[in-house]
Image (cartoon, helix red, strand yellow):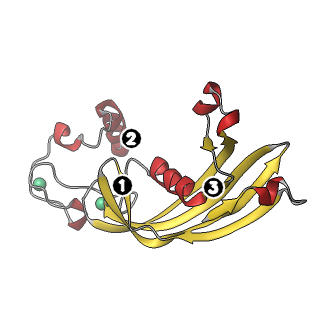
Amino acid sequence: MKFDLTEIKHNNSTKKDIDFTIELEHINYNGDLIKVVTPANVIGVLYDLEGKTFFVADVKTKMRTKCSRCLKGIDFNYNTNVNIELIHEDNANEEKLNEDVYIYNDIIINLDEIVEEAIITNIPMKILCTNDCRGLCTQCGKNLNDGACNCELTESDIETEGIDPRLLKLKQFFKNE
Ligand SMILES: [Zn+2]
Ligand SMILES: [Zn+2]
């Protein structure tokens, strides 16, 4: 959606409710193409506060991807948000660039671009099919959500997914109590 900033800058209103959807086929996430199953729904507000312009919105969509642990294909409900200041390039300076800002040079801005960037930036590092997904056996590759395998797992085999082994020991300690 294109938005003409004069609507909030030079009219009497300083606030504009936003509600639109973006058709996205894929999200390019570090070279991986993640399929987007439902259009991204964006609900929020554009407002002007003491001469500064802000865009705040909730974004909801659904993506088809793989569980990071067991690699099963899943449709993942993805919610994120946009909270950004819009700055004209004439007013942009170095220190502003480190904050959540969007620099524009045309008074008509492309909100799709901002939303898409927020979607990519906020994708979680790990997407799990369920919070307690057991993952794959590191020896035989069996999906442990379907039941245990017959491998004799040593502690170092269990230690996957970057769990700190000391933490794992501690966890087992409490479990055994
Ligand atoms: Zn899983
Ligand atoms: Zn196994």
Establish if 126 lies above or below 12: above
Circle 3 is placed at which residue position?
A: 109
Circle 1 is placed at which residue position?
A: 28
Residue at 18% x, 60% y: name it: 148
Crowding near the residue tagged with mark 2, few <14, some 14–19, many ≥20 C-alpha atoms within 10 Å:
few
Q: How many marks?
A: 3
Circle 2 is placed at which residue position?
A: 174
Residue mark closest to the camera, 3 vs 2 = 3
Q: What x and y, as percent, mark residue 22?
A: 52, 68
Residue 4 placement: quadrant: bottom right
Q: Which of marks 3 and 2 is nearer the N terminus?
A: 3
Q: Residue 153 carries which label?
A: none
Distance, label 1 to label 2, CA atoms, is 42 Å
**Secondary structure of residue under mark 2:** helix
Residue mark closest to the camera, 1 vs 2 = 1
The amino acid sitting under disc 2 is Phe
Establish if 39 lies above or below 120: below
Residue at 64% x, 31% y: name it: 96
